[in-house]
Image (cartoon, grey):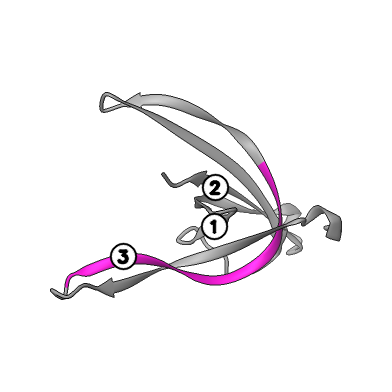
Amino acid sequence: MIRAGELDQRVTFRRKTIAYDSYGEQIPTWADAFTVPAGVNTTGGKEFYAAQKKNAETECLFKIRYMKKVNVLMRVKWCGREFEILPPINDVNAKHTTLLISGKEVV
């Protein structure tokens, strides 16, 4: 069971949509789907070199009330930052009360 005080942030789940430019080419965009209260814990980050460039990654753990419509094809927007949802989405104790969602920041 989640206590209300644990969900002290608001996160927005976003779905991928397709828009078209003036030439008719597809442009992937992200549209807001729904906003829910959540608990957010940053689980750390790392820096690494790839293609002769220094990169940084930040990971977060989002805790929300159970929702069947959340899936790994979505993104989470929190405090102006976007996170890609990493599989698996954890239904805590398989009781359909709490979801734990790991996310990696999209840079």
Contact between marks 1 and 2 (CB within 8 A): the answer is yes
Quadrant of residue 2 within the rendered picture: bottom right
Secondary structure of the residue carrying tag 3 is strand
Give the image location of residue 99, x and y in percent. 68, 57
Give the image location of residue 84, x and y in percent. 48, 51
Q: Residues within 10 Å of mark 1 (few under 14, many from 20)?
A: many
Of the numbered discs 1 and 2, the one sitting upstream in the chain is 1
In space, the residues marked 3 and 2 are separated at their CA atoms by: 20 Å
The residue that disc 1 covers is 76
* Vertical side of 44 occupied by 102: above or below: below
The residue that disc 2 covers is 103
Of the numbered discs 3 and 1, the one sitting upstream in the chain is 3
Residue at 50% x, 28% y is 46
The residue that disc 3 covers is 28
Quadrant of residue 41 within the rendered picture: top right
- Please tell me whether mark 3 or mark 2 is closer to you in this view: 3
Q: Is residue 32 left or right of residue 10?
A: left
Quadrant holding the C terminus: top left
